[in-house]
Image (cartoon, rainbow, N blue to C red):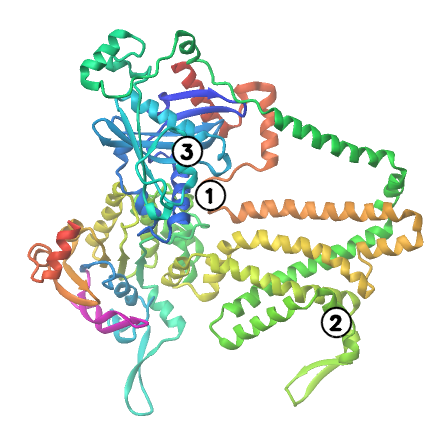
Amino acid sequence: MSAAIGVHGAVKAFGDQVVIDGVDLSLPAGSVTVVLGPSGSGKSTLLRTINHLEPLDRGVVTVGGETIGVRLRTGRDGRVRYQELPERHIRRQRSRIGFVFQHFELFPHLTALENVAEGPVAAGVPVAAARARAQELLERVGLGDRGVSRPRQLSGGQQQRVAIARALALDPSVVLLDEPTSALDPELVGEVLGVVRDLAASGTTLVVVTHEVAFAREVADHVVFLDHGRVVEQGPPARVIDAPQHARTRDFLSRVR
Amino acid sequence: MTDTADVTTRSTRRGELVFRVVHPDDPAAAPLLADLEREYDARYGDQLDGGAAAELARYPAEDFVAPRGVFLLLHEDDRLVAGGAFMPHDDETVELKRIWTAPGARGRGLAGRVVAELEEEARRRGSRRVVLTTGPRQPEAVALYRRAGYTPLYDVTRPAEEVGVHAFEKTLAPGPADGDRGTRPGHPAGATRAAEGGRASRPVAPTIDAAARAALDRPVLPLRHPVRWIAAAVVLVLLLNGVETLFTNPAWGWPAVGKWLFSPAILTGLQLTLVATGLSAVISFAGGVLVALARLSRNPVLSGLAWGYVWLFRSVPLILVLVFLYNLGSLYPTIGIGVPFGPQVTVPTADVLGDLAIGVLALSLSEVAYASEIVRAGVLAVDHGQLEAARALGLPPRRQFVRVVLPQALRSIVPAFVNQVVGLLKASSLLFYVSLLDLFGVVQNLSSTYPTDIIPLLVVATLWYLALTSAVSVVQYHVERWTNRGSARSLPPTPWQRVRGAVRRRPGGAGRLPSSARGARVLTADARSAR
């Protein structure tokens, strides 16, 4: 399998605080990767660099072989550097990467259907076709009858399912989920994880930041444990979760379980 | 429908108070939880890790459902006014949670009723103690619990912030509802049993006599407020005195008011006021959006210029701008555009700027400065996550603003901007100083021609300004309903819908309620038949 997502020498700092400190990852197409780590370890930031919501200070992210948000340029001094792409190129790249936020971030003034159709309409898909596709996606996440509801009229779990449908609307090859269940009441977590499970089974490349260790063990092909912006340990869940090699991984797992 | 069976009703002078037991996930409880979350975030946002939502999600819903706990809502007519819950603490103790009163219903002792009802329920379930905690920034909650007979479990002499969590407890006296335990107060047999049961150390239940017991099933009478009535009467008498002079004092000149109100001269002035205000309002909104965007732009030249513009026109009085523009012709006899120090296209100033154009321009120039600050504040109030979501979807910048940010910003922009428009309406009376005859200008002119009609003419102007401002308020109300469409689960009825509902309700009685009220009424009826 070719690498769908590659992270190469990624470094990112906010002021003096280095949050991503030299991360290299290679995630094959169709794989499901779960990123674990204590809070403040840089999990969310790493995820956000993949669709260029956070630009990297150094290093580069590739999705489907294409560098995201930057391109190589040869300067006058003969050295090659990465340079930021114009906004419209980044926009095109983002439309192929779905992103699901911890706090859903649905547009409250639009209905569920309009939320899902918004991306395609903005990308130039005719409104009728975008709405038909949005209806299909809402049905796929079990909310076919809630298209006219506004986000405030839906439960947290329903909102997150609409947000997942919205992320799928442009048929992305990669979907990134940033703690999709952390803002939910415990009894609503299951319905969202169910949708993510179906998505994993459909062959979409997924990267999920989560604290649901049981879910990681069941669904992930690959688990990455991050601490202080570095990859401490990675591998199949059977190794990283059930037989962690590193003391920090063991320590973290004993606290979340 | 097990939820609806458990309802107790009590009438008050304002309306019918109905207690309902619900599941914590019942949509009916959602406003309570949402408001609690907002309230906690507002008071403890700096301390709560993960926000109030995480705090409210700490206990599973089952803890608030019988037999473990209970979740109560108090409705007044169809409106949710208060609520609360308890969950198990230990075998004979429950812990109160979620005590809440709707913002509009505070200060009426409703929370106290909820606490009393919860204690009653706890007693029925066999609990003998109630505990609860509240926080240092809820002095009203602390006052409520002390009033309700709770004992503070902290040092009351220390400052609230130092105490941190404020814990309380209260021992429940076994009440009349404690029937299933066999401890009936006032019955010697029950008392003996209580003593045998090892409860001798507990406080003895207060006994109530037969007469008091008979009152238990009757509605509690509300307290009378005679002082309120006296104060209202005094104010009304004073007001009527003033109103009387409107009719008895001939100097008001009501026939003259009637004569002038729709006279062509006044209507011409009114038209000018409307045109100048309307044009300036539209220009200032559009200009305000542009200047706000420039101010928020990452381009330092644009944002610097926008800041300078706002600084200049907020500092200079409107009348100065007006008179300045009026004399622009003597400062720049011709105006034009072209390459600096290169070829120019010029025209005489007076040809471009007529009197009305000068007036509208001056009003707009200063209004744009205020409007831009209003728009900027509105845009900044939209959650940053919304913009990120729009970017993650690949929306172009213009669509991010027009489709996602602006509609949400309008919620806070509209009330402030309408306020500006009302100010603008009145500020347009300054146009009189640059020889434009707006409503006020016409009145001024007519007063010097008809000096005996000065008072009636001023009344005419007052009436028209009142009418215009009222019209603006009506428009505002409906625009706000529209901009709020995503922020509430359902919109309250408009005054007009309320009037229609009331009219429809009157002739047919309970059988002809508007559909929105029907569900809740049936609920109350169920409750009555259940008792």
Residue B442: where, in percent of width, then height?
A: 84, 55
* Quarter of the figure with residue B436: bottom right
- Magenta-drawn segment: A1-30
Amino acid type, callout 2: Leu
Does residue B518 appear left or right of residue A176 in this picture?
Answer: right
Q: CA distance from mark 2 to mark 1?
A: 46 Å
Determine the residue positioned at 27% across, 63% down: A47
Does residue A202 appear left or right of residue A171 in this picture?
Answer: left
Which sits in the foreground, B158 or A96? B158
Which sits in the foreground, B230 or B220? B230
Mark 3 residue crowding within 10 angstroms, few (<14) / some (14–19) / many (20+)? some
Mark 1 residue crowding within 10 angstroms, few (<14) / some (14–19) / many (20+)? some
Q: Secondary structure at mark 2?
A: helix
Chain hosting mark 3: B
Q: Which residue is mark 2?
A: B325
Residue B404: where, in percent of width, then height?
A: 46, 57
Determine the residue positioned at 51% across, 47% down: B484
* Quarter of the figure with residue B316: bottom right
Q: Secondary structure at mark 3?
A: helix
Looking at the image, residue B186 lies above or below residue B361:
above
Q: Nearer the viewer, mark 2 or mark 1?
A: 2
Q: CA distance from mark 3 to mark 1?
A: 29 Å
Q: CA distance from mark 2 to mark 3?
A: 62 Å
Q: Which residue is mark 3?
A: B144
Determine the residue positioned at 25% across, 61% down: A40
Q: Which residue is mark 1?
A: B488
Mark 2 / mark 3, whichever is N-terminal: 3
Amino acid type, callout 1: Ala
Amino acid type, callout 3: Leu
